[in-house]
Image: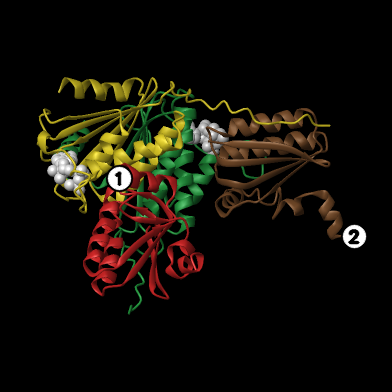
Chain colours: A red, B brown, C yellow, D green
Amino acid sequence: MLDIVTRQKDQAVIVAISGDVDLYSSPEVRKVLIGLTGRKAPLIVVDLRAVSYMDSSGIATLVEGLQQMSKYGGELRLFGLGAAVREVFELSRLDKVFQIYDSEAAALPDNQAAETP
Amino acid sequence: MLDIVTRQKDQAVIVAISGDVDLYSSPEVRKVLIGLTGRKAPLIVVDLRAVSYMDSSGIATLVEGLQQMSKYGGELRLFGLGAAVREVFELSRLDKVFQIYDSEAAALPDNQAAETP
Amino acid sequence: MKATKRKRANLHNKTIDTVEFRVASDPKLLKIIRAGITHLCELIGFTPQQSQQTTLAVDEACSNIIKYAYGGATDKPIIVTARLIQNGIEIILRDFGKKAVPAEIKSRDLDDLRPGGLGVHLIRSTMDVVSYDTSRKRGNELRLAKFSAAPAAAANSDQTPVVPASS
Amino acid sequence: MKATKRKRANLHNKTIDTVEFRVASDPKLLKIIRAGITHLCELIGFTPQQSQQTTLAVDEACSNIIKYAYGGATDKPIIVTARLIQNGIEIILRDFGKKAVPAEIKSRDLDDLRPGGLGVHLIRSTMDVVSYDTSRKRGNELRLAKFSAAPAAAANSDQTPVVPASS
Ligand SMILES: Nc1ncnc2c1ncn2[C@@H]1O[C@H](COP(=O)(O)OP(=O)(O)O)[C@@H](O)[C@H]1O
Ligand SMILES: Nc1ncnc2c1ncn2[C@@H]1O[C@H](COP(=O)(O)OP(=O)(O)O)[C@@H](O)[C@H]1O
């Protein structure tokens, strides 16, 4: 149902999620994030392009990740939010709390540096 | 729900269907085919690439089209059958009755000529 | 009791105008409800946004039944009944678990950032009617409704296929 | 009668292990049933082909209820109950319409090419159990079952997410 692929890319860990993130599947996302924040990953980039549905349990999981990371100065970034997912963030007024990017390239620090040399 | 786009391409009329073809929507397909066979379209090519589901009512509609066309010597060709749709044809033993092609190019007479010059 | 009797007689003998999902309180079944609600919303001509909002609200409401009415038990009944009304959709969610305390059914302050505490807020901000009823003999009933701005399109397909004049 | 009573008590008080869809006999609602059945098949680990076959059979059976039991009326009840069994899925389709004549429930000869007459053939060639019961007081009951070759995978997600060792 839910498919999560995590890979290292330079300083970042990219977590690509596919499927619906709901009460059933969000614990799987949580496991991955807890694993990464447990070893203080400095930058986690969550790829939501293949997430067609996310409810408040998915949002809660990401808020938890954000708070864990802020404790050790890590950064959580999101990209690839479809209309339905983006709206849940907006309704929750979290679209300004999370760092949300349009693409993986934009979310990765190297490219940002390249864009503002 | 169901989307049908019909267009002329040289001698052929291409009928592109998107959506599920079932008891609810197959009458719409039938209307289009009846319209075309009514004016004796010589070649109808049905594009099924965007059909993810078809049941026996869809099959029945195509069989009716086939029979109408054979009365005046017209030809009905299909292409773009996904695994689920193809299986319904196979289970009905109609995969050998219909002319089934892999692509639009293969289903069109010009290209066939080009392939066998 | 009478209402239940009437409903059953209705079901077996006469006509029905609702779609009812009876599922166990198992999170893995939520997707079934979502798929059904989304399809119904599409049938009545809701915009994609209206469909997504309705589906979200029903999913959040079911999640809360699982979490609060049934304390996480996955084998208790949830009945979701959807009715296509004049210009929108009405959805009744019925459980037979622990009664909710109405005053407690509210999300956290949105500025108080913490995991959780958003479901009820999402339900209330997406639906036009949200009405909790804990007065039933057993369990709870939640009535949700959402209206389209304009009267919903008739649920019939009247797409006109494009058929060009042919030689 | 007794069976019905027991079922209702069961529903309200105890545990349920089925998913039930109660819909009007309207072709436009078939997609809801299909989506639900497909999802259940995926949950028990059916292959895509097994899922598609099961969904096809249920859709054909519902279509026949609409056409024959209800003569095309779109407001009559259809109850589809799915149960995840040991190594597959069991689906009961219940209607309250005209009784079927068992000897007539058969498709045309496949070689006799004509529109229609394939639904029952598709049901019988895709399901492992097909059992029509017209002995109920009212209407018909069709029991379908399909088994996976191997015992179906447990319905829990135990995908192990790939987490690389990180710096
Ligand atoms: N169906 C329900 N039954 C009982 N209590 C509920 C129900 N739904 C919500 N609540 C109460 O409302 C509170 C807020 O719920 P919600 O906004 O969904 O966030 P969360 O579930 O994360 O706490 C819950 O903590 C609970 O006390
Ligand atoms: N649920 C049913 N109730 C009564 N008769 C049925 C039912 N299902 C099938 N039949 C009978 O079986 C025949 C074959 O059905 P089917 O193979 O689905 O093809 P078609 O519906 O196109 O005739 C029908 O014509 C009908 O007489």
* Residue nearest the viewer, comparing C73 with D44: C73
Q: Residue at x 23, y 59 (%)?
A: A64
Q: Which mark is residue C60?
A: none
Horizontal side of residue B14 vs C62, given as left or right? right
Q: Chain of mark 2?
A: B
Q: Chain of mark 1?
A: A
| Mark 1 residue element | loop
Q: Find residue B74 and report its horizontal and vertical position in percent.
A: 81, 38
The residue beneath circle 1 is A93
Q: Residue at x 75, y 50 (%)?
A: B107
Q: Find residue C109 and report its horizontal and vertical position in percent.
A: 18, 43
* Residue nearest the viewer, comparing C19 with D133: C19
Q: Tell me whether circle 2 and circle 1 mark residues in contact (CB < 8 Å).
A: no
Asked if A13 appears above or below B83 in the picture, the reply is: below
Horizontal side of residue D31 vs C15, given as left or right? right
The residue beneath circle 2 is B117
Looking at the picture, which amino acid does disc 2 mark?
Answer: Pro
Q: Picture quarter containing residue A38?
A: bottom left
Q: Find residue D153 and report its horizontal and vertical position in percent.
A: 34, 63
| Mark 2 residue element | loop
Looking at the picture, which amino acid does disc 1 mark?
Answer: Arg
In which quadrant of the rendered image does the N terminus of chain A lie? bottom left
Q: Is any atom of residue A7 visible in this view?
A: yes
The quadrant of the rendered image in which ligand 1 is seen is: top left
Q: Residue at x 80, y 34 (%)?
A: B41
